[in-house]
Image: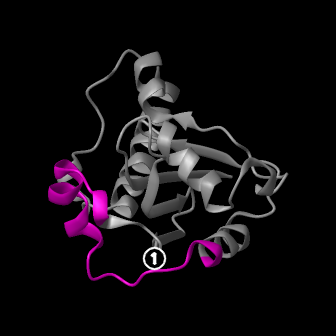
Amino acid sequence: MRYFLKADFLENGPTKPIQALALGIVREDGESRYWVYADADLREVNGWVRENILPRVNGKPTTQRSRIAEDLVSFLGPDPAIEFWSYYGDYDRIIVQQTFGHMGEIPRWLQTWCMSVRQYSRQLGKPEILPEMAGYERSALGDAMWARDSFFTLAAFEAAK
């Protein structure tokens, strides 16, 4: 089963780890989950995150990281055929992994890599066919839905070649 994910996060350079703010995951069948992390430290938010991300998550219900990990296990599996997909998803998969704690705490059945919708598009010659972002809620969940729809648009394009 394919799962399309997107995370909102804080990133303040090489001396500070990335911190999860929100995570959206959409299964290929459309079932989805969205969490705002209760334990995010917002004291050192950079200007871009303050302007572009905080308005998306402020006022939404928050969930403790440990509960998000439990919810992820329930939502994902254990599914030995999981495929994570994202659009520029390098940090997104790290957010999923860090939700469980350190590397040794990640469930063994959970894959630790992510396929890229962006790379898939490039592989197909970057066709100008992806859906407009304007039709999606600006949130981690909306971005994950857009990645899912973009993947299926590209897959249909590839199948028609």
4 horizontally vs 104: left or right = left
- Relative image position of residue 52 (x, y in whole percent): 19, 56
Q: Is residue 52 rendered magenta in the image? A: yes
- In the picture, measured across the screen, residue 50 lies left or right of residue 95, that is left
71 vs 37, nearest the viewer = 37
Q: Main secondary structure of the magenta part?
A: helix
The residue sitting at the front extreme is: 15
Colour pattern: one colour
Packing grade of label 1 (10 A; few <14, some 14-19, many >=20) is some
The residue tagged with tag 1: helix, strand or loop? loop
On the image, the x and y values in percent for residue 132 come to 21, 45
Which residue type carries mark 1?
A: Ala
Q: Taking 119 as reference, is 95 above or below it?
A: below
Is 44 located above or below residue 55 in the figure?
above
> Which quadrant would residue 40 be assigned to in this image?
bottom left
Q: Nearer the viewer, residue 23 or 142?
A: 23
Per the rendered image, the range of residues in magenta is: 43-67
**Residue shown at the point (76%, 52%) measured from the top left:** 110
- Residue 129: horizontal and vertical position, in percent? 29, 32
Which residue corresponds to mark 1? 38
Q: Position of residue 59 (x, y in %)?
A: 27, 82
Q: Residue at x 41, y 30 (%)?
A: 118
Q: Nearer the viewer, residue 127 or 63?
A: 63
Question: Foreground: 83 or 95?
Answer: 95
Name the residue at 48% across, 42% down: 91
**Above-or-below relation of 151 to 108:** above
Q: How many numbered circles does the render carry?
A: 1
In the image, is residue 118 part of the stretch drawn in magenta? Answer: no
